[in-house]
Image (cartoon, helix red, strand yellow):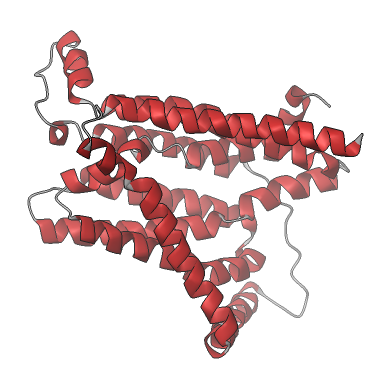
Amino acid sequence: MTSKEILKIRNVRCFLMFRTSYFARFYYPVFTLLYLDYGLTLSQFAMLNVVWAATIVLAEVPSGAFADTLGRKRLVVLSSLVMFIEIAMIAFVPTGNPTFVFIVFLINRVLSGLAMALASGADEALAYDTLKEQGKEELWPRVLQIQLRLSSSVGIVVTLLGAAMYDVNFMASVYHFLGLAEPETTQDIMRIPVYATLLVALIAIYAALGMREAKRVIPSNENKLASTIASMKLTLNTAKWVLSTPYVLFILLYYSLFEHTSRMFLTMNSQYYRAIDIPIIYFGFIGAGISLLQIKAADWQKEWRRRRLS
């Protein structure tokens, strides 16, 4: 089955579109610089990353429970809507009051973590279930390979454009060409990558709405309210079990710390690049190089799998 034929499957196509647009963040190459230009400090930036990681961990169990009640498609749609709201918050927040800005970014991090948890696995499940219904589940590894290559390819473009959007010299030439007043600092152009991401978020919403899910049959002795209450009880019981089980609690706390540490390492690079006087526009080329390695890794994985099966 060719890639073109795979893309004709609606849920697979929407899954690829959703995943690609969901993580197409133009501000990622300058993530730390963006926060600092909004008036936040490095310690506040670190604190917000902790909140983001903790929210994902805490929301994973409830999102899994509600997937059985609300349905996976509704979770994916809700995730895309929450993502749009959290990006819009930083796109339009006024920067005059540092305390207000921090509060807005704090809410933004909570919503971002919630959106990530809501979509976690739900989009994949919708695509995989569709393949399984059609007896084509053996195509799933190929779908994941396509997703990796597509996301990495789009990531290259987004990374290059995002860094260029934050480079004062590059944007000054663009503004001059358009006959606009040229920007003088990054604070004059810091919202442009966020606006671009906000537009791409609309594609994620469109893809989420385009997914299809088989209607869940509720047993005759149940109703939606009872099912929702049961899911909430399951969530509370699971939370109690986690808190009373030191080993599981340790794993969750360790994951939060690991996620926070790794994210700090990945996002602090823009501040480091600025410290050693690397022009911002080159941040994109560095990120694009990483995306190229991801594409190559997908090719290696495909070749390894072919040799293993031969």
Q: Position of residue 64 (x, y in %)?
A: 61, 67
**Measured along the vertical axis of the image, is residue 310 above or below residue 119?**
above
Considering every residue shown, the one lying at the far bottom of the view is 244
Q: Is residue 19 left or right of residue 194?
A: right
Residue appearing at x 49%, y 53% in the figure? 79
* Quadrant of the snapshot with the N terminus: top right
**Measured along the vertical axis of the image, is residue 124 above or below residue 24?**
below
Residue appearing at x 84%, y 47% in the figure? 133
Q: Position of residue 134 (x, y in %)?
A: 85, 42
Considering every residue shown, the one lying at the far front of the view is 276
**Measured along the vertical axis of the image, is residue 193 above or below residue 125?**
above
Q: Is residue 91 left or right of residue 230?
A: left
Q: Is residue 43 visible?
A: yes
The answer to which of 223 and 211 lies nearer the viewer is: 211
Q: Position of residue 110 (x, y in %)?
A: 36, 62
Q: Is residue 9 visible?
A: no
The answer to which of 15 and 185 lies nearer the viewer is: 185
Q: Position of residue 310 (x, y in %)?
A: 92, 34
Residue appearing at x 39%, y 25% in the figure? 285
The answer to which of 1 and 65 lies nearer the viewer is: 1
Residue appearing at x 23%, y 26% in the figure? 167
